[in-house]
Amino acid sequence: MSHPTPVLEPISLMAAGELRDAADALRRGDPVTATAALMAIDAHSWQAIEHRLATLGASLPELLTTVRNQPEEDG
């Protein structure tokens, strides 16, 4: 018996970039910039991000805490 492929809600490219920028800012210890980046994410992308994280058994606060506790990579 085959299972239907779940339809994932879209995350805009802008929102994906803002989430990445927020994560980078947290790694640098800059919560103000991280907050500004998160505030720029549109409502539909927020819902999609939360839904995708929930399917992985995680939440956005858990993800951001994990990111904040990782050392910044030299690049």
Image (spheres, helix red, strand yellow):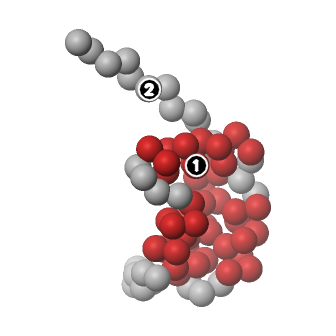
Disc 2 marks which residue?
6
Could you tell me how many numbered marks the image carries?
Answer: 2
Residue occupying image coordinates x 42% and y 81% = 70
Q: Position of residue 3 (x, y in %)?
A: 32, 19
Kind of residue at disc 2: Pro
Residue 27 seen from this side: yes
65 left or right of 47 in image = left
Residue 14 appears anywhere in the view: no
- Residue 50 badge: 1
Q: Is residue 71 above or below residue 23?
A: below
- The residues tagged by marks 1 and 2 sit, at their Cα atoms, a distance apart of 15 Å
Residue at 60%, 77% in the rendered image: 25
Element on which disc 2 rests: loop
Q: Residue furthest top?
A: 1
Which residue type does callout 1 highlight?
A: Glu
- Residue 75 position (above or below residue 8): below
Q: Which mark is residue 2?
A: none
